[in-house]
Image (cartoon, rainbow, N blue to C red):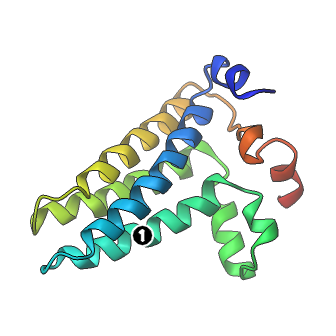
Amino acid sequence: MSLVEELKTRNFSIYGQWIGVLCIILCIALGIANIFHASLVIIFSIICIVQGLVVVFVEIPFLLRICPVTERFSNFIRFFNQNWPRAAFYIGMATIQYCSLIFMTTSLLVPAVFLTITSMCYALAALKHQEFTGSSTLGGAGIARQIL
């Protein structure tokens, strides 16, 4: 199935996965950009970078096969192969980034907003009783089944 066909299915877990990929880029880029603040925002910048790296493994399942990771980390990532756990995962990460606003308003607000949007996509998929579906472009169709 091509990317266009996947997007036409109106499955919100596909939308969530693609917005999650955008979150990877935003978290890493804006985490690095904000690491140079001379305040406690540095802590949230580091957390944002780590969040981006964790989301890489959550959203691109074939990386669990090709990257050397521990069994514990692999099991942690596999826990998020349902819509509700992913929605909770993303809203939790967004909440952490929203907390950075306590110290200073920075561009870390952007990853927080996109993490929230991703969480809403997965929550909508769960509320509509849509089956969790990974994008075949990101290795979700055949490869993800082998990993599990």
Name the quadrant of the C terminus.
Answer: bottom right
**Residue drawn 28% across the image and 72% down it:** 44
How far across and how far down the image is residue 139, in percent? 77, 48
Looking at the figure, which quarter contains the N terminus? top right
Query: Which x, y percent locates residue 121?
Result: 48, 34
Residue 52 x, y percent position in the rendering: 48, 63
Residue positioned most to the top: 8
Is 83 situated left or right of 103 in this image?
right
Task: Name which quarter of the figure residue 146 lies in.
Answer: bottom right
**Residue 120 versus residue 44: which sits nearer the camera?**
44
- The kind of secondary structure element at disc 1 is helix
Residue 84 position (above or below residue 98)? above
Q: Please name the amino acid that badge 1 sits on.
A: Ile
Where, by quadrant of the figure, is residue 142 drawn? top right
Nearest the eye: 107 or 116? 107
Q: Please count the marks in the image.
A: 1
Q: Is residue 146 left or right of residue 32?
A: right
Above or below: residue 74 compared with residue 12 = below
Q: Which residue is mark 1?
A: 49
Residue at screen point 33% across, 61% down: 30
Residue at image position (62%, 26%) is 11
Residue for point 69% across, 33% down? 131
Q: Position of residue 129 (x, y in %)?
A: 62, 28
